[in-house]
Amino acid sequence: MPDLNEAQAGASETEIPAALGDLLTPSGQPAELIAIEEAPEKPKRKRKRRFTIPNLRLYLLVIGLAAVTTLGVLATVFIALPSPAQPTATPSPYPTFIEMTPVPTTPFQDLIGMGYRAITLEQVGSIPADTRVRISHATINTDTSWTYTIIAEDEQRVAEAQPWQIGYAPGVIPGMPTPTGEFFDTTLTIVLLEDFGDISAGTVVSVGSGYFNGYEWIYGVITADGRYADVPASKLRRG
């Protein structure tokens, strides 16, 4: 019994020449192959992009962000630029006048530094009422009121008084001129009428200074050997 594999092999050898013979012409040359051209594909039409409402909003948002960014960059550059130099003002050759508020006049202007011509109207510090005092100076306050520094006749008690706490002493007329001191003449010979300190009566002295205490002049006298005393005019005489 012939082998099945051999039979299949023989059949294949027989079929192959027959198949190849189909491709041969009667002259034994291979038949021409006819190329079949494929029809060209039609070009695809580009889809036109339509601007819908959502797309338009997106474009506007992008444009807005770009504008804001550009403005921010420009602002940063502008701030970083150095500012132009300011012109220096030329000083005026003329003085500048400042209008000042006028200082009100103190009620006791004529008593300041003029001796014991004032009197206390009430207790002021350690100085009782009805005490003769002198005004050494006055100070103006922020509310344009005045405060007076008063000193008693013992030259020990000092207080700060308000205008309503003091007044003119009896016999003192407001605005009354101060009498002239008679012992300021350096050509005079001046003699003490009584003892003052370590200077005995009858000593010849010279006047170095003086002030009016509201009653009379008080003179600062000096002896030839340099001793000093404050002596009222009533205790001096011409030599």
Image: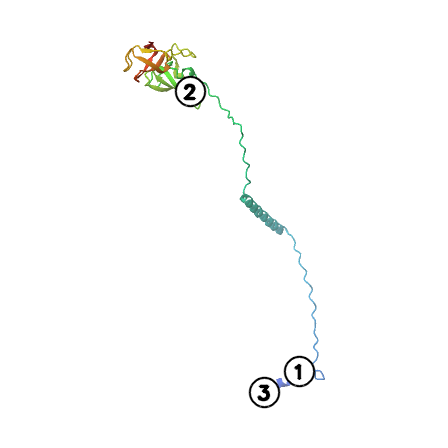
Label of residue 195 in the image: none
Q: Which mark is residue 6?
A: 3
Amino acid at circle 2:
Trp
Q: CA distance from mark 2 to mark 1?
A: 144 Å
Q: Amino acid at mark 3?
A: Glu
Give the mark nearer the N terminus: 1 vs 3. 3
Q: Closer to us: mark 2 or mark 3?
A: 2
Q: Is residue 92 above or below residue 58?
A: above
Task: Name the image quarter holding the C terminus.
Answer: top left
Instruction: Name which of mark 2 and mark 1 comes first in the sequence.
Output: 1
Residue that protrudes farthest toward the right in the picture? 26
Label 2 residue SS: strand
62 lies left or right of 180: right
Using the image as rendered, state which of residue 11 and residue 68 is in the foreground. Answer: 68
x and y, in percent, of residue 197 in the image: 28, 15
For residue 20, the mark is 1
Depth check, front residue: 185 or 10: 185
Q: Residue at x 60, y 85 (%)?
A: 9
Report which residue position mark 2 lands on. 146
At which x and y percent is residue 122? 36, 15
